[in-house]
Image: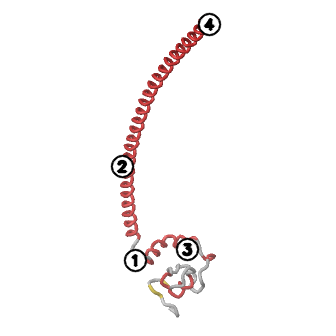
Amino acid sequence: MGASSIQGGVNVEKAFYRNPVSRSPKLSFPLLSHQEKETPMTTTNLAAEDIAYIKGNLGAWLAEQSLGKPPAVYEIELRERLVRIEEELKHQRELIKTILEQMDKRFEAVDKRFEAVDRRFEAMQQSMDKRFEELTRRIDRFMVWSFATTSTVGGLVVAALKLWP
């Protein structure tokens, strides 16, 4: 077997040289059967079968290096998270509907207040119109009375001057 040791089908020493990402034998990938065991792996040495093999086993290798949970556990956790997120979104949607209904009620109340203020202004306008009409009528009577008085006094003064020797 030579100087390198083989553990679980993985040539640790050769895998150390073949993993360009990490120099740790813990993260090494198993050797491919048709590759030379003496030369370091480069991208030019990868064949289509090698790429397919890596793609096929990459998920399992990554799962081994993560917290020891298999991909099925991750999928279950993701589904649980999705369910929690969906429930939270449903709850938020209900809250938004409630808030919108409350806002509609408040807007209706404000509209009623504006309508009441409009009615008050209209009533005040009508009362002011009545007062101005009454004032105009009184001024008109005063002007007629004033003209009549002035004419009478003027006529009496003219008659007194003519009669006065």
Residue flagged by tag 4: what amino acid is it?
Pro
Looking at the image, which residue sits at the far right?
44
Q: Identify the residue position indicated by label 2 in the image.
A: 98
On the image, the x and y values in percent for residue 39 come to: 60, 85
Quadrant (top left/top right/bottom left/bottom right) for the C terminus: top right
- 51, 106: nearer the viewer: 106
Cα distance, mark 4 to mark 2? Answer: 101 Å
Cα distance, mark 2 to mark 1? Answer: 45 Å
* Residue name at image x 53 percent, y 84 percent: 15
On the image, the x and y values in percent for residue 109 come to: 38, 41
Asked if residue 9 is positioned above or below residue 92 in the image, the reply reads below
Q: Identify the residue position indicated by label 1 in the image.
A: 68
- 122, 34: nearer the viewer: 122
Q: Secondary structure at mark 3?
A: helix
Q: Identify the residue position indicated by label 3 in the image.
A: 50
Q: Which mark is residue 165?
A: 4
Residues packed near mark 1 inside 10 Å, few (<14), some (14 to 19) or many (20 plus): few
* Residue name at image x 38 percent, y 67 percent: 77
Camera-near label (3 vs 2) is 2
Residues packed near mark 4 inside 10 Å, few (<14), some (14 to 19) or many (20 plus): few
Asked if residue 32 is positioned above or below residue 137 in the image, the reply reads below
Q: Are marks 3 and 4 in contact (CB under 8 Å)?
A: no
